[in-house]
Amino acid sequence: MTNITLTVNGKSVSRDIPDETLLSEFLREHLRLTGTHVGCDTSQCGACVVHVDGKAAKSCTTLAVALDGAQVTTIEGLANGDLHPMQEAFTEHHGLQCGFCTPGMIMASVDIVNRYKAEGRTLTEKAIRHELEGNICRCTGYHNIVKAVESAAAKM
Amino acid sequence: MSTGIGARVPRKEDKRFITGKGRYTDDIRTDNQAYAAFVRSPHAHARIASIDTSDALAMDGVIDVLNGKQLTGDGIGNIICGWAVTSKDGSPMNMGAWSALATEKVRYVGDAVAVVIAETQAQARIAAEAVVVDYDMLPAVATADKALADGAPQIHDNAPGNLIYDWEIGDAAATDAALAGAAHVTEMALTNNRLSPNPMEPRSAVATYDTAEDHYTLYTTSQNPHVARLVLSAFYNVAPEHKLRVIAPDVGGGFGAKIYIYPEEITCLWASMKTQRSVKWTSDRSEAFLTDAHGRDHISTAKMGFDADGKVVGLKVDTIANFGAYMSLFSSAVPTYLYATLLSGQYDIANIHCNVRGVYTNTVPVDAYRGAGRPEACYLIERMMETAAREMGKDPAELRRANFVRSFPHETPVIMTYDSGDFGANLDQAMQAADVAGFATRKAEAASRGKLRGIGYSSYIEACGIAPSAAVGSLGAGVGLWESAEVRVNPVGTIEVLTGSHSHGQGHETTFAQIVAERFGIPIENVSIVHGDTDKVQFGMGTYGSRSGAVGMSAIVKAMDKVEAKVKKIAAHVLEASEADIVIEGGEVKVAGTDKAMAWHEVGLSAYTAHNLPPDMEPGLKEGAFYDPSNFTFPAGTYICEVEVDPETGVTEIVQFTASDDFGTIINPMIVEGQVHGGIAQGVGQAMLEQVVYDDEGQLITGSYMDYAMPRAADLPSYGVHHASTVCPGNPLGIKGCGEAGAIGTPPAVINAITDAIGNNNLAMPATPQAVWKALQAAN
């Protein structure tokens, strides 16, 4: 067991956890933040993506004990009160159906837009499709997800 | 903004999903929660000599370890196939016994033999590794053709030669004669590759037993919770229906894989009673590949004959269907009544005969996956049609057009009666949107860049609106396939609709609310859709086969008809007018042509205060209905795919994809287009990426997303989706259904485009770069 203290969605949390606890398990089972999903066991599907210190990370392959002192943002904490432009764009463009991949897809997409903006690069449709390689959706065929990310990028 | 029929209403359900507030089965944790981990066979075929649980039982946190003999000893019944298909010699299908936990033999890698119940998931999984099962290995067989061969391993004693049934449809002699007299016969051997459905939410179950009430509750990832309760109760003897509540909360996609009642749900319920603990199991993706029912897996040969004018005179098909190790719930119907009955496609064909052999193998059970039988039929017909056009030097679009069914109703030789459609209109719309006229220019331009550009068509038809109960009953179905609904108008005029349909991505909470809001002129915010809980909704058959629009919403319309009739009686009484003069519009219930009116909520209140109701009228405003369809519905359309192949590498890019669909009436075009997008993506997946692979010993090779190629964003294009609709005459809203079309129409369009580009018709799915490159070399 190891004691860790980190900031999750702006609040400080401290827990004694087994060393093998994954961040996804820590969020879902210890903090009961069940918006972060686990859709595979090979770090491929991206349903578990959260932000660690402002960057996208797959919480299913991140050990929670490695994050002592880190800032973690989950889908529950992405926006304060109102919706984040990416959340709005996903519903406006029908970028979700069953909703299971959606939290990871939104968190990954926010990270993509942030990175391109920071680097001054243009986010084309092709770039969005390439950047979403680590997130699998089985429902939408990605068409409307790509539109949502394009739309949100213009507003972020 | 309009919220009625035809409006692109944003989804009411979205907010919880985009904010992380969705409630899926694995998000539920009950008091007294324990966790299950299954001990699974690592062998494809073996006898169980012994199971030693002593080490596992002694491990930290382990509550119990249970096996198949205990399960059957407690009277838990075998898993059933719910559709009886009769062989052509009149004999019944050979269904082998399937116990939720194997007792004597294991028949596929992943077959469960025991279950560990422990305090934590980690403890359960570690202890499952410590259960020692002694197996006597048996030879295994993974493919249907090898399972039929002489000397193949015998999987079930009561299915000699591994044959489940040998079934036929159509007139063999007449078809043979038509082919003998044909001016041209196209012959092909076609396989329909085996797929894993892969909804992104893995299956999960939380089972709780209440000792005081002798009552069970099951949260589960189901497309049809009432069917789950019925089967768990009537066949698996878990508990009588009134002592079993099944809840399918938010469900993260289904695509068929969550129709069936699997060993894990049964075992968790039984274990919750045995251990007096709430038992939770959530599959990981590796377990999902090993246990979720797979789809497709047909091997076929076919002959299509044409007269000198290019008219199809006959189609003869022989198909072998791989069922896996056990017969899953709908498995028997998929390669027969959902497949062979669609072999006439969009064409007027006088003679069709199809023979189907269902075969056991040492693989995961195979059942319905998005489209279920219809993609296999469409792939066969549309590959044949395109290849025939090339062989005869005809334009593939015009060959199709010359053979289209043009008048309705049209009875095919394979027992379907098409009710409506305008196949030429869809072909024209697709050709125009795809700019087929400009293809030669695009091909030349691609050639200048060293790319091979090809174009391929697919004109699909499917049967949805599953299904008229008496018709499917006569064909062997064990249940009726109607749907139910209840419309509850509250005293303040808001409405709850209880539906037996289940939404796991389809957006019913929005679409269903649209038809209610429009009908009664109330804000869509005032309508709630309730589904997925057997304690709330009385009964329902659930969602699969694109049935929730055509069947589920028809039941809602029937219930609304009854509500409207009562509302008019109440208003006529209160307003002292004739019932025939009452109209409902703009949120009011009025006397036509006067200023006499009641607000909608005033009628609701009147029904419940009951101070001034017509004599003999019961208080309240709540009506239920069951809707049983009169026929299948027949969505149809044409898809056109354009690809560019890099001849050096075989890498293929879909550069344009155009769909024209006839879905009948469309309630929410945004949602319908989303269904088409997702279907096309799964169709492209089948055509170019996905393939479940077993080795000769029955070991699953493609057991993770590292090995099984799921379509990702960069694998897919944007899609051009168009509609040219005819109204379905068979249901009150004129709906045909849209959920499966993309997965049905897409694969042949893609393969026809690639084979056009490379000049070789001999290309199997999935058309990976290696397969395309090899086919290209063979052509040169």
Image (spheres, grey):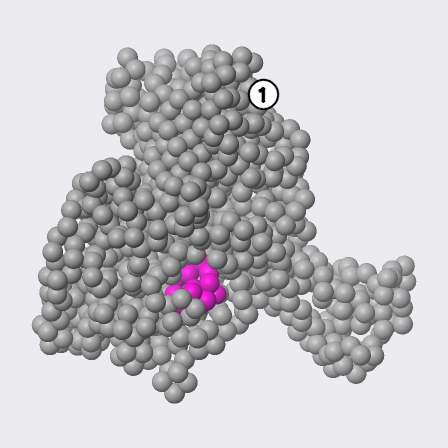
Q: Is residue A15 visible?
A: no
Chain label for disc 1: B
Q: Nearer the viewer, residue A123 or B473?
A: B473
Q: Is residue B679 above or below residue B258?
A: above
Q: Position of residue B596 (x, y in %)?
A: 87, 67
- Which residue is found at the position 54% from the left and 58% from the top? B480
Q: Nearer the viewer, residue B40 or B280?
A: B40
Q: Position of residue A33 (x, y in %)?
A: 34, 68
For mark 1, give the secondary structure. Answer: helix
- Which residue is found at the position 53% from the left and 54% from the top? B473
Q: Position of residue B616 (x, y in %)?
A: 80, 79
Q: Which residue is mark 1?
A: B402
Q: Nearer the viewer, residue B133 or B579?
A: B133
Question: Is B229 contained in the magenta span?
Answer: yes
Image quarter for residue B19?
A: bottom left
Which region is colored magenta?
B219-232
Which amino acid type is shown beneath numbered disc 1?
A: Ala
Q: Which quarter shows the C terminus of chain B?
A: top left
